Image: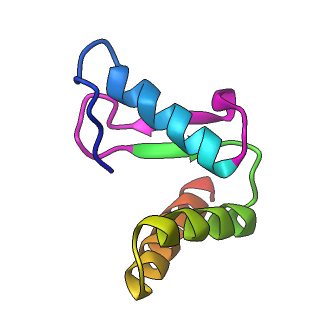
Amino acid sequence: MRFSAAPVDGAVNLALVKLLAKALGVPAGMVRIAAGARQRNKSVLVEEVSPSVLMGQLRTLLESTRRGAQADELVAAAVSRSVASRC
């Protein structure tokens, strides 16, 4: 994702959290930057959402912006990492 917000005072992180919360239909308090708050690449934690529900929501979100198998690959990789980190 690309944001127009300047990387100052956490503006990009806040924009990312708000965007994901809205897209996933969860309160913003359930979404947080787990790693990479000061980096270009970030890991995001969505609390209290099962991996299967999260996978479906992310697939829908990605398919609305990217077409084809690439969206499925991105979703599968994201959810796999999420599940693995919980174990």
Q: Give x and y (percent) for residue 71.
A: 44, 76
Q: Give x and y (percent) for residue 9.
A: 31, 12
Q: Is residue 33 visible?
A: no
Q: Compared with residue 16, is residue 69 higher up or lower down, i.e. above or below?
A: below
User: In this figure, what is the number of numbered marks?
Assistant: 0
Instruction: From the viewer's side, name the closer residue of 16 and 39.
Output: 16
Q: Give x and y (percent) for residue 37.
A: 34, 30
Q: Compared with residue 81, is residue 16 higher up or lower down, i.e. above or below?
A: above
Left or right: residue 26 versus residue 42 is right
Q: Residue at x 26, y 28 (%)?
A: 38
Left or right: residue 65 versus residue 8 is right
Q: Quadrant of the C terminus?
A: bottom right
Q: Residue at x 28, y 46 (%)?
A: 2
How is the protein colored in the picture? Answer: rainbow
Q: Residue at x 72, y 33 (%)?
A: 27
Q: Give x and y (percent) for residue 13.
A: 39, 29
Left or right: residue 80 versus residue 38 is right
Q: Is residue 8 visible?
A: yes
Q: Is residue 9 located in the magenta-colored stretch of the structure? A: no
The extreme bottom residue here reads: 69
Q: Quadrant of residue 8?
A: top left
Instruction: From the viewer's side, name the closer residue of 59 and 40.
Output: 59
Per the rendered image, the range of residues in magenta is 25-42
Q: Compared with residue 1, is residue 51 higher up or lower down, i.e. above or below?
A: below
Q: Compared with residue 50, is residue 32 higher up or lower down, i.e. above or below?
A: above
Instruction: From the viewer's side, name the closer residue of 50 and 28.
Output: 28
